[in-house]
């Protein structure tokens, strides 16, 4: 019996070591770290509306609208570029807010290099 009582006391002592965040107004957890990436070389497309992308790259290979977002995908022999468009907070025309790029085999590629390759491809401007 002493053995179980000792375990119970030990368990209660260890239970006090765990911290549970309060849901009070002063204890808001920090936001998750944001993904940061360089926008160098992406000036031609970040902040641009869909018609500017079509003018620069030609007709997209695929388009997908989900909720408030729109994805336009452009491809070449070298890479695939996904441009994500969202309306500004105050409303208005959706613009490119994020760009992702990959090689045709799925391997990573620099986004700016992919943009340059797409501009030079047949169908791009």
Image (cartoon, rainbow, N blue to C red):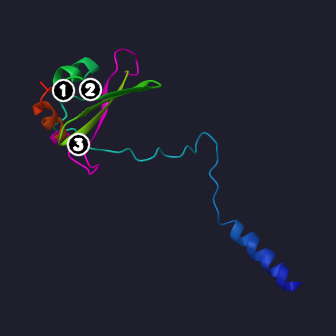
Give the magenta-colored segment's residue range: 88-113
Mark 3–mark 1 distance (CA, rounded to whole Å): 21 Å
The residue at 41%/47% (across/down) is 33
Q: Disc 2 or 3, which lies upstream in sequence?
A: 3
Query: Spatial distance from mark 2 to mark 3, Cα to Cα?
Result: 24 Å
Which quarter of the picture shows residue 87?
Answer: top left
Question: Quick one: 71 or 49, which is closer to the camera?
Answer: 71
Residue 83 part of the magenta segment: no
Position of the C terminus by quadrant: top left
How far is mark 2 from mark 1, CA to CA?
Answer: 8 Å
Q: Position of residue 78 (x, y in %)?
A: 17, 43
> Which quadrant of the rendered structure holds the N terminus?
bottom right
Disc number lying in front (2 or 3): 2
Task: Give the label on residue 99, or none.
Answer: none
Dot 2 falls on a residue whose secondary structure is: loop
Circles 2 and 1, Cβ within 8 Å, touching? The answer is yes
Residue 83 versus residue 28 in the image, above or below: above
Q: Nearer the viewer, residue 111 or 90?
A: 111
- Give the residue displayed 17% in from the left and 35% down from the top: 115
User: Which mark's residue is nearer the viewer, 3 or 1?
Assistant: 1
Q: Which residue is mark 3?
A: 38
Residue 60's place in the image compared with 115, above or below, is above
Front residue of 32 and 69: 69
Q: Which mark is residue 57?
A: 1
Dot 1: within a 10 Å radius of its alpha carbon, few (fewer than 14), some, or many (20 or more) residues?
Answer: many
Q: Which residue is mark 2?
A: 60
Query: Relative to 28, is 108 on the left or the right?
Result: left
Displayed quadrant of residue 121: top left
**Residue 79 in the image: above or below residue 59:** below
Residue 92 picture location, percent across and down: 36, 14
Q: Is 103 placed left or right of 19 in the picture?
A: left
């Amino acid at each position: 019996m002493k053995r179980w009582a000792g375990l119970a006391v030990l368990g209660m002592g260890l239970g006090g070591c765990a911290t549970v965040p309060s849901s009070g107004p002063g204890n808001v957890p920090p936001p998750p770290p944001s993904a940061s990436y360089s926008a160098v070389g992406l000036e031609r497309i970040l902040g641009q509306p869909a018609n500017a992308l079509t003018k620069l790259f030609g007709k997209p290979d695929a388009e997908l609208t989900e909720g408030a977002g729109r994805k336009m995908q452009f491809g070449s022999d070298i890479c695939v570029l996904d441009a994500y468009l969202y309306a500004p907070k105050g409303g208005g025309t959706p613009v490119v807010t994020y760009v992702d790029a990959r090689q045709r085999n799925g391997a990573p590629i620099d986004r700016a290099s992919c943009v340059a390759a797409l501009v030079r491809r047949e169908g791009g401007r």
